Amino acid sequence: MKLFVAGLPYDLDDAELEEIFEKFGTVTSAKVAIDKETGKSRAFGFVEMPDRAEGTDAMESMNGISLGKKPLVVKEAEERSGPPSGGGGGGYRGGNSGGGDFRNNGPRRY
């Protein structure tokens, strides 16, 4: 079972996240999401637990608990469908499928 965990303290690392969830059973992996540009935590992560009952117990026990300033939100992770998000061109975008800002290009000359 893969769990989504939001509201993590910004200084929490993968090992600490794993340690927190190990109290409920076996943890296959624990990953804190890191911002690619800043290298800092995005305050959420994912925990994988092979036993569904242990994962459900962890989810029910940890949801709403505060580890820092905010309460945790722990729920079953949703499987991604389609290509990864985050940029990329192509497709129709509200009438401007070409590049650049079309609002300030001045009068068109043909």
Image (cartoon, helix red, strand yellow):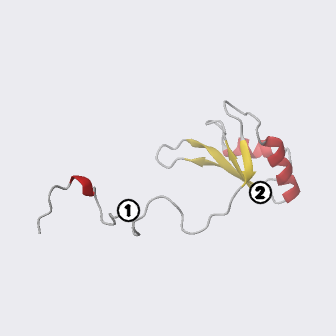
* Residue beneath the point at 82% across and 60% down: 50
- Secondary structure of residue under mark 2: loop
Say above or below: 83 vs 46.
below
Q: Which of pointers 2 and 1 lies earlier in the amino acid sequence?
A: 2
Q: Looking at the picture, how far across and down is residue 81, in whole percent?
A: 61, 67
Q: Residues within 10 Å of mark 1 (few under 14, many from 20)?
A: few
Residue pointed to by mark 2: 28
What amino acid type should be assigned to the residue bearing mark 1? Answer: Gly
| Dot 2 amino acid type | Thr
Taking 20 as reference, is 42 left or right? left
Q: Residue at x 80, y 48 (%)?
A: 59
Which residue lies under the disc numbered 1? 94
How far is disc 2 from disc 1 in space, using C-alphas?
43 Å
Q: 4 or 96: nearer the eye?
A: 96
Q: Is residue 48 left or right of residue 79?
A: right
Looking at the picture, tell me which residue is in the foreground, 103 or 57. Answer: 103
Q: Position of residue 46 (x, y in %)?
A: 69, 52
In front of the other: label 2 or label 1?
1
